[in-house]
Amino acid sequence: MSEQNSPIDPASLDSLDAIADCLADAFEDGDGAIIGAALKAVSQAPGLGALAAAVGVPREQLGAALASGEFDLDLTLEIMKVVDLHMSGGRSGD
């Protein structure tokens, strides 16, 4: 992520676009601590409902899984697919 020392403000993740950007940056960085921080921020984000709908998981279940850091490979792959599909449609300049 471009601001590695700055915590992610969950309030800034108010749309699927913002969540996709955040997670794409974290996955791209590859640092486990950064990915974990991004997932925790997403678990508290106002836009979590949009991600949950795209992944096909109830919002509360997704939030709890992301906050605890305990979710299976299938959910991880679904989240990554949503991020990838979402990003392929529009990250300008990247």
Image (cartoon, rainbow, N blue to C red):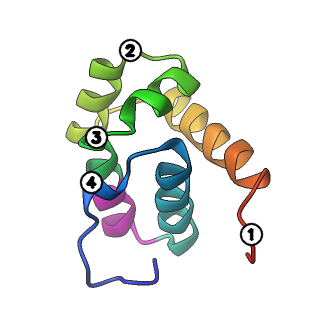
Q: Amino acid at mark 3?
A: Ser
Check if residue 32 falls in the magenta segment. Answer: yes
Mark 2 vs 3: CB contact within 8 A: no
Q: Which residues, given as a range, are shown in magenta?
A: 31-38
Seen at 35% across and 58% down, the residue is 38
Which residue in the protein does label 2 denote? Answer: 58
The tag earlier along the polypeptide, 2 or 3, is 3
- In the drawing, what numbered circle is on residue 10? 4
Residue 94: x and y in percent read 73, 75
The tag earlier along the polypeptide, 1 or 2, is 2
Could you tell me how far apart the alpha carbons at marks 4 and 2 are, in whole angstroms? Answer: 19 Å
Name the image quarter holding the N terminus.
Answer: bottom left
Residue 33: x and y in percent read 31, 67
The tag earlier along the polypeptide, 1 or 3, is 3
Mark 4 vs 2: CB contact within 8 A: no
Mark 3 vs 4: CB contact within 8 A: yes
Q: Amino acid at mark 1?
A: Ser
- In the drawing, what numbered circle is on residue 92? 1
Could you tell me how far apart the alpha carbons at marks 1 and 4 are, in whole angstroms? Answer: 23 Å
Could you tell me how far apart the alpha carbons at marks 1 and 2 are, in whole angstroms? Answer: 30 Å
